Amino acid sequence: MKNPISLETISENTVFRNGDVFVLFGELFGRGYATGLVDQARKAGMQIVGITVGRRDENNVLRPLTDQELSEAEARLGGEIINVPLMAGFDLDAPPGGPTPTDLLARLTLEGWESEKLDWDYIEKCQAVATARFTDALAQVMAVLDGMIPEGHNVFFAHTMAGGIPKAKKFLVVANRIYKGTGARHMSTQALLDSDMGKLILRNFDEVSANTFRHLIDFSAAIRKRSEASGGQVRYTAYGYHGTGILIDGEYRWQTYTNYTQGYAKMRLEGIAEDAWSKGVRATVYNCPEIRTNSSDVFTGIELPLIPLLLALRKENGGRWADEQWRACEELLAEGFTLDDVFAKIAELQASDVMVPFYDFAAWPMPNSQAQADLTIGTSNEITAMHRSGKVVISDLLSALVVEATGQLIFGASSSPSGPVQWLNHDVVARRLNATHEVPISRSPSATRQVSGSASLSSLPQISLAS
Ligand SMILES: NC(=O)c1ccc[n+]([C@@H]2O[C@H](COP(=O)([O-])OP(=O)(O)OC[C@H]3O[C@@H](n4cnc5c(N)ncnc54)[C@H](O)[C@@H]3O)[C@@H](O)[C@H]2O)c1
């Protein structure tokens, strides 16, 4: 992508209805992005079907969920789960009797990993074993799913898989230093990317976060053809990340969390949607804002661009409800601190000479630097310390709002998707939230009626703070 393409219009669902089938391709966690989309599918009366990644036993053998795990997961999802393990990635796969890539990582040393080499011919064999395992399981899942989709009904496939961090202690030590290390504990992402250890990790990210979307599209081809032949429609969505337009200095500007090593996989994911779209498949990657979830908690500072969503709520004609969100957030701060103190800290970071070079769309995802990591992690820690409790923070409240809004936006846009890659920036997220929650008598009564987008977006795409 040369420029971020924003979703500007808030649309409502006109396609999906009672009895249609919503398939969640990934497991559902309480705080995860997918909860927003599943809520919308449920409200539309769709039948919800899920999958599982399975679980590893003590010998790392992949197994389906036990009866109890299955019933808990189905209760959480509110739908039936096809219990065939779809764990992606090759970190724990190997030809019979051979070491897995995780075993190979364990043999690297903490002193020498930057120059130590891996056997790539062998790793390719492990990857082939994993791909065959995944696609065999996927074929079984699709056969079961086929029997669950009645003639003439629409199908919504929602991909949510992302991950691939191998559970190798050596890598976890390095990852901790990259994502959380400051001062003498800082570790350069470039050093990781240049090493064989880093190349292995990136390949596994590709496998989990991107290639699974292609497998999903390919292996559901028969279902797609059958549904379309009987008058149904089929959509595919996936969650991307490629920075977000947020309010900086009164204007919406593109910025990013740094360092996001998974960004290469996310660009591959975009490419898969573009390729499918060019072949007539309605597959769209929605690049979503930074929020805190089970998966993103590893990235210290990811919440910094989220907090200015409060500013967007007001800019997009928020009224009483927006004021309530401000108040609820301010109440989470310790005695003596105000939201203005928090915004000032974030604004200082965004404007600093250290950060400005990182807000370059064309150069994304840039490796970290010592000064950038110190500033990002330091600011994150300072803002956490401004709260009454480090466990109840503003970013949790705002993450839940973003999950709600993106679920509505993606579900609504999917009736008539306008392209293979779309950014959900803070402006449209704030407009969506205000349209849902503000009662018509607000600071600006016209705001709640302005559901389809004519709000000023003239400042987007602004791809660089420096531009
Ligand atoms: N959290 C953010 O800031 C953010 C921002 C933009 C996009 N996203 C994307 O949203 C999607 C959902 O992530 P989330 O942050 O809500 O977290 P989450 O932890 O709720 O979801 C992660 C998903 O990945 C699946 N998964 C993890 N490892 C897997 C593996 N080895 N094989 C198969 N599936 C695996 C899980 O089952 C789960 O469905 C991801 O694609 C993520 O990249 C997140």
Image (cartoon, helix red, strand yellow):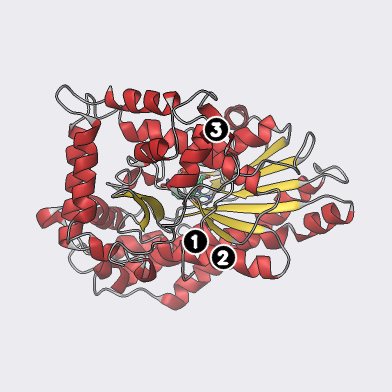
> Can you identify the residue that label 2 sits on?
129
Sequence-earlier tag: 1 or 3? 1
Give whichever of 27, 310 is nearer the camera.
Answer: 310
The residue most toward the left is 184
**Few, some or many C-alpha atoms within 10 Å of disc 1 (few <14, some 14-19, many ≥20)?**
many
Local SS, label 1: loop
The answer to whether 179 is drawn above or below residue 435 in the figure is: below
Give whichever of 219, 16 is nearer the camera.
Answer: 16
Report, in whole angstroms, how far the alpha carbon at label 1 lies from the one at label 3: 48 Å
Q: In the image, is 244 to the left or to the right of 342?
A: right
Horizontal and vertical percent for residue 174?
Answer: 25, 57
Horizontal and vertical percent for residue 304?
Answer: 29, 45
> Can you identify the residue that label 3 sits on?
448
Q: Nearer the viewer, mark 1 or mark 3?
A: 3
**Few, some or many C-alpha atoms within 10 Å of disc 3 (few <14, some 14-19, many ≥20)?**
many
Give whichever of 282, 161 is nearer the camera.
Answer: 282
Q: Nearer the viewer, mark 1 or mark 2?
A: 1
The answer to whether 394 is drawn above or below residue 4 in the figure is: above
Q: Nearer the viewer, mark 3 or mark 2?
A: 3
Q: In the image, is 22 to the left or to the right of 421?
A: right
> Can you identify the residue that label 1 sits on?
90
Q: Name the residue rendered at 18%, 49% in the picture.
A: 348
Quick check: can you spot residue 188?
yes
